[in-house]
Image (tube, rainbow, N blue to C red):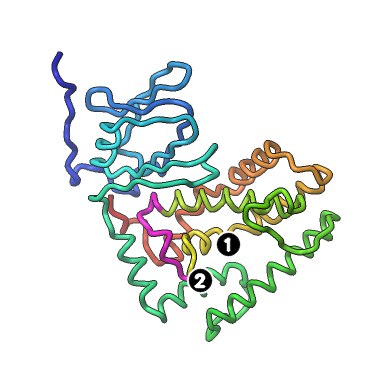
Amino acid sequence: MGQPLIIRTQLSNIPMLRDRYPFLYFERGRMEIDDSSIKWISADGKHFRIPAAVISTILLGPGTSITHEAVKILASLNATVCWVGEDSLIFYAVGQAPTANTYNLKKQLALASDPEKSLGIARKMFASRFPDADLRGKSLKELMTMEGQRVKALYLELSEKYRVGWKGRAYVPGEFQLSDTTNRIITSANAALYALCSSVLYSLGFDPRIGFIHSGSPLPFVYDIADLYKAELVFDLAFSLTAKLGGDYDRFCILEAFKNRLLETDFMGRCPKDILNILGIKSKEKIS
């Protein structure tokens, strides 16, 4: 038998990022090549051809395997591969092509390395949370103090709204079960939100390690972006579900409710646009 026909794709022929589908999620199956295309074989034996050249990011969930040749082809197409948890709600690792375009990364680094511009980006992030406040002249420390006070007030407001007891945010790493139900839901939803934000940032070519507000942590930019959505996707969800579940922690109910919030708020559609808007990058500037 002859060798499978593999047609090498030139970078100049790859669709621009703005013309690509942001991501596809797969679980419980195998990804391999079939002649010149990427093929997905599901656990029940069904075969699907994947238009890898027009996909920005492949998310591989539990029960998946991928062949060496498939990774090589995806890399040649500048498609990012991420290894994630169930429903992409945990982010484990990422594989990026060495030939991937660095346009957005250069923009991010230029903004983050200039103290004045970096502070300007931080103010834009806080502006959405303080629409009526004049943030001009505010230092990063002052902005973060304002945010801390806002979040504490929001916790109390939601506690009264849903009639849920609240003693404050408390979570000890490795001792998840010791937290109360509301704190456990917040912790779980935060982890899921961080995973999704990581996937979006990688798919756009940004570095999650280069932030504008947070620093000294593994994923500063992820935390910067996630904070934009926590009020609607995490905090309100946690208090409302605590009341609904009577204080019980039901993982599947929480997961379903979180996914519904994502769909209702069009998170995956909004998040990439919000990031580009905050950094002042026009969609047409993006390159494959």
Quarter of the image for the N terminus: give it: top left
Residue at the image position 69 percent from the left and 42 percent from the top: 254
Q: Main secondary structure of the magenta part?
A: loop
Residue at the image position 83 percent from the left and 55 percent from the top: 164
SS of the residue at dot 1?
loop
How many residues crowd around disc 2 within 10 Å: few (fewer than 14), some, or many (20 or more)?
many
Q: Is residue 79 left or right of residue 178?
A: left
In this rendered view, identify the residue nearer to me: 35 or 275. Answer: 35
How many residues crowd around disc 1 within 10 Å: few (fewer than 14), some, or many (20 or more)?
some
Whether residue 208 is in magenta: the answer is yes
Query: What residue is shown with label 2?
Result: 213
Whether residue 72 is in magenta: the answer is no
Residue 277 spot, x, y in % from top left: 44, 63
Residue 56 spot, x, y in % from top left: 36, 44
Give amino acid for label 2. Answer: Ile
Residue furthest toward the left?
2
**Number of the label disc, if any, that sits on residue 227:** 1
N-terminal-most mark, 2 or 1: 2
Residue 77, placed above or below residue 152: above
Q: Are marks 2 and 1 in contact (CB under 8 Å)?
A: yes
Give amino acid for label 1. Answer: Asp
Residue 245 spot, x, y in % from top left: 80, 42
Q: Is residue 140 left or right of residue 255?
A: left
Which stretch is magenta? 202-213
Residue at the image position 74 percent from the left and 53 percent from the top: 179
SS of the residue at dot 2?
loop
